[in-house]
């Protein structure tokens, strides 16, 4: 967990809380922002910055028309479960683990066998 932000009440029926994970895959870290919405905002209270976590989330996207009438799109990563990271098992469909992953091509002797 890289950063945790306070809840934002955007309307009577919608509250969101954002947080950022530092994902250590590949050569450079990635900083990915997720959001918790409404009754899920308190899920993050049990965790703190610099703690390794596994999250489960849904990718959501919606179109909207801007002031100039141009169609735009936005995406959200809606987190619905947070767990303390199990560093022994870092791959799970539909989840993201903050633990470092092994580079699959690191140390490969024969790069000519690539399928592309």
Image (tube, helix red, strand yellow):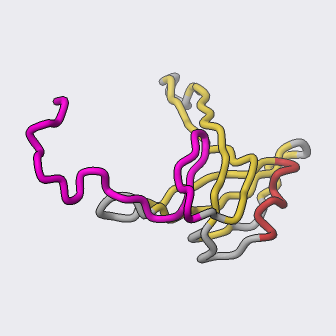
Residue 95 falls within the magenta-colored stretch:
yes
Kindly identify the residue that appears in the image at 57 percent across and 40 percent down.
93
Work out which residue is located at the far right of the displayed protein and give it.
12
- Of residue 86 and residue 55, the one placed in the foreground of this image is 86
How many numbered marks appear? 0
Residue 51 position (above or below residue 10): below
User: What residue appears at the point 89 percent right and 42 percent down from the top-left corner?
Assistant: 13
81 vs 42: above or below: above
**Spot occupied by residue 73 in the image (x, y as percentages of width and height):** 52, 30
Rendering quarter of residue 18:
bottom right
Is residue 80 found inside the magenta-colored segment of the image?
A: no
Residue 16 x/y as whole percent: 76, 52
Q: Quadrant of the N terminus?
A: bottom right
Query: In the drawing, does residue 107 fall left or right of residue 102?
Result: left
Please give left or right for residue 4 compared with residue 114 in the image. right
Left or right for 39, reference 94? right
The answer to which image quadrant residue 6 occupies is bottom right
Q: Quadrant of residue 116?
A: top left
In the depicted view, which residue is nearer to us: 113 or 42?
113
**Residue 50, image x and y in percent?**
59, 77
Vertical side of 4 occupied by 17: above or below: above
- What residue span does the magenta drawing correspond to? 87-116
State the image coordinates of residue 105 (x, y, percent, origin top left): 24, 51
> In the image, is 54 to the left or to the right of 6?
left
């Amino acid at each position: 967990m890289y950063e945790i932000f306070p809840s934002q009440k955007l309307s009577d029926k919608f509250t969101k809380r954002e947080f950022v994970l530092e994902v250590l895959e590949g050569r450079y870290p990635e900083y990915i922002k997720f959001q918790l919405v409404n009754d899920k905002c308190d899920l993050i209270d049990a965790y703190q910055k610099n703690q390794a976590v596994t999250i489960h989330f849904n990718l959501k996207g919606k179109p909207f028309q801007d002031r100039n009438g141009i169609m735009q799109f936005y995406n959200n990563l809606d987190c619905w479960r947070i767990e303390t990271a199990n560093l022994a098992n870092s791959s799970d469909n539909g989840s993201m683990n903050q633990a470092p992953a092994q580079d699959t091509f690191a140390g490969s002797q024969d790069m000519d066998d690539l399928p592309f």
